[in-house]
Amino acid sequence: ALKIQPEELNRWEAELLQILKFEVLMKEIDFIRVSDVFAKRCEGILQEDNN
């Protein structure tokens, strides 16, 4: 079996957490972008209805 020292494990966990946080952040940024596009599209539709 592969022996991993506790401090090494902590380093791996820290790196994994960084990667996961980055993934979540990218998804949130995508979601914000999509929401923004959707909001603008809705505004455009509302403005067309008003005319």
Image (cartoon, helix red, strand yellow):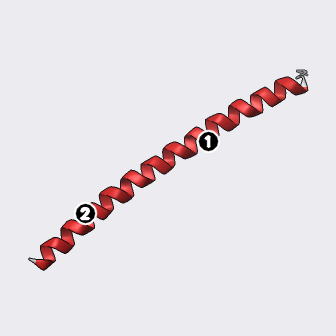
Residue at 77 percent across and 27 percent down: it is: 11
Position of the N terminus by quadrant: top right
Between discs 2 and 1, the one toward the N terminus? 1
Counting from the top left corner in percent of width and height, residue 36 is at 34, 57
Outermost left residue: 51
Residue 40, located in which quarter of the rendered image? bottom left
At 50% from the left edge and 50% from the top edge, which residue is drawn? 28
> Pointer 1: residues within 10 angstroms few (<14), some, or many (20+)?
few
**Mark 1, residue position:** 21
Q: Which residue is disc 2 drawn over?
A: 41
Q: Is residue 50 above or below residue 9?
A: below
**Who's the residue at 57% across and 46% down the image?**
24
Q: Is residue 42 left or right of residue 5?
A: left
Secondary structure type for disc 2:
helix
Q: Is residue 50 above or below residue 29?
A: below
Q: Please rate how many residues cluster around mark 2, counting C-alpha atoms within 10 Å: few if below 14, some from 14 to 19, many from 20.
A: few
